[in-house]
Image (cartoon, rainbow, N blue to C red):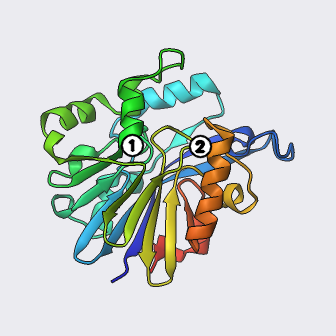
């Protein structure tokens, strides 16, 4: 039995065009700014409720300050209706009954509410976790608590360790839901392929906008052009429905953020 997908916006950041589209393929739009709509997804079917990403933590002041230091125009906004507990209530999702949480990538926009789900299996890309916890000495390290909030990281170690599932670079989360390492954005970035009544859908942070995938232009904030090109080719081959993790257009293409 296929799954349904329901998407929700959980915050907005203004981003320069160079962050969304790599400079090499084209210069057009390089100086433009565009909103990134951060999303989570609720996947239901076969008696399961699966949540992809858990949104931002309750207090985001430190993130807002960090982004403004990076660029004063990189504003972040979030309404009360976009807070994850409110979203889940609107979707009639009881966090205690969520079976599985999938995190892609490991970042402030995905890890802020892991502890809301006390019984869920927590799926993280094994190779991405290793790169975070045992980083290459020659590669700059991100601020750990901006990747996973301190409260949530301690929760993983103290309360959820037995429920953490470290996915292989090719894996099956549940019947009809499979994942593969897609990279391009972060070492923990995955493509999540979900069977729906209208075709196979792919949710991923490896492409920010439909244009990355459909025009074959890698993201601007990325770790590997080669990973991007390989991931995009595979997604176009294996999926019929594309879900960029940060594109406002998903709510136009899929009215109400619903698929299936």
**Image spot of residue 153 (x, y percent):** 26, 32
**Residue name at image x 32 percent, y 69 percent:** 91
For this rendering, which residue is in front, 77 or 40? 40
Left/right placement of residue 132 relative to residue 257 reads left
Residue bearing the label numbered 2:
184
Left/right placement of residue 100 relative to residue 226 reads left
Image height of 149 relative to 170, above or below: above
Quarter holding residue 50: bottom left
Crowd tier of the residue under label 2, counting other residues whose Cα lies within 10 Å: few below 14, some 14–19, many 20 or above:
many
- Kindly give the residue lying farthest to the top in the view shown: 137
Quadrant the C terminus occupies: bottom left
**Image spot of residue 254 (x, y percent):** 55, 74
Quadrant the N terminus occupies: bottom left
Image height of 139 relative to 123, above or below: above
**Image spot of residue 118 (x, y percent):** 15, 51
**Image spot of residue 38 (x, y percent):** 50, 51
Q: Earlier in the sequence, mark 1 or mark 2?
A: 1
Crowd tier of the residue under label 1, counting other residues whose Cα lies within 10 Å: few below 14, some 14–19, many 20 or above:
many
For this rendering, which residue is in front, 55 or 215? 215
**Residue name at image x 27 percent, y 45 percent:** 114
């Amino acid at each position: 039995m296929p799954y349904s997908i329901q998407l929700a916006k959980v915050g907005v950041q203004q981003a320069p065009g160079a962050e969304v589209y790599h400079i090499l393929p084209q210069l057009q739009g390089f100086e433009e700014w565009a909103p990134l709509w951060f999303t989570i997804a609720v996947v239901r079917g076969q008696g399961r409720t699966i949540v992809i990403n858990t949104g931002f933590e309750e207090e985001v002041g430190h993130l807002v300050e960090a982004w403004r230091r990076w660029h004063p125009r990189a504003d972040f906004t979030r309404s009360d209706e976009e807070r994850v507990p409110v979203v889940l209530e609107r979707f009639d999702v009881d966090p205690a009954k969520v079976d599985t949480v999938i995190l892609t990538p490991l970042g402030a926009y995905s890890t802020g509410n892991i502890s809301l789900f006390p019984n869920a299996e927590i799926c993280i890309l094994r190779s991405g976790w290793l790169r975070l916890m045992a980083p290459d000495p020659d590669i700059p390290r991100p601020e750990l608590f901006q990747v996973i909030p301190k409260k949530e990281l301690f929760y993983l170690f103290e309360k959820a360790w037995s429920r953490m599932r470290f996915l292989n670079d090719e894996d099956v989360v549940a019947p009809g839901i499979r994942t593969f390492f897609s990279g391009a954005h972060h070492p923990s970035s995955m493509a999540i392929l979900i069977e729906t009544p209208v075709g196979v859908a792919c949710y991923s942070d490896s492409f920010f906008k439909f244009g990355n995938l459909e025009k074959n232009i890698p993201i601007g904030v990325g770790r590997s052009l080669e990973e991007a090109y390989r991931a995009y080719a595979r997604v176009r081959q294996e999926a019929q429905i594309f879900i960029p993790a940060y594109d406002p257009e998903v709510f136009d293409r899929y009215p109400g953020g619903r698929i299936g």
